[in-house]
Amino acid sequence: MSRTREGWNSIPDGFGATFDLRRAPLWLRLAYRTPFVDRTTFPRLVRAGLGYLVPHPDTSPSVGTVARAEARGWKVVEARELAAILGDSRAGRPLFRR
């Protein structure tokens, strides 16, 4: 039985996820890049407000889905907002889940 981890295997359908590692503490950035340890960093990043969800361009997320995601710590933004927040080309390529 697998354990559900926010940001690792619990991303709402119709959204892409990305994380702002530039604002994360050094120890968390190192853990993020360490195999097997990395999956424990995703929930911490979400709780710290460093996890961003971007709605898939072909979908229109419901208000309830957005509210539940925000209650768990995600920040829901449009792709163009994410580009301004992260300030790099990664913003246009969140990992989408359908």
Image (cartoon, grey):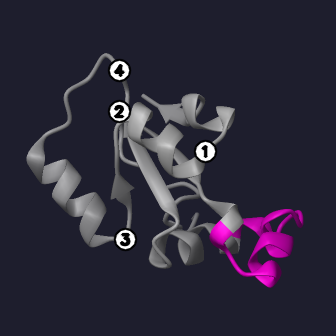
What residue did someone put label 4 on? 57
The alpha-carbon separation of the residues under discs 1 and 2 comes to: 23 Å
What residue did someone put label 3 on? 73
Residue 16 location (% of width, % of height): 47, 38
Amino acid type, callout 3: Gly
Crowding at mark 4 (Cα within 10 Å: few <14, some 14-19, many 20+): few
The mark closer to the camera, 4 or 1, is 1
The mark closer to the camera, 2 or 4, is 4
The alpha-carbon separation of the residues under discs 2 and 4 comes to: 9 Å
The mark closer to the camera, 1 or 3, is 1
Check if residue 45 falls in the magenta segment.
no
First reached walking from the N terminus: tag 1 or tag 3: 3
Secondary structure beneath dot 2 equals loop
The alpha-carbon separation of the residues under discs 3 and 2 comes to: 17 Å
> Magenta region: which residues?
23-39
First reached walking from the N terminus: tag 1 or tag 2: 2
What residue did someone put label 1 on? 87
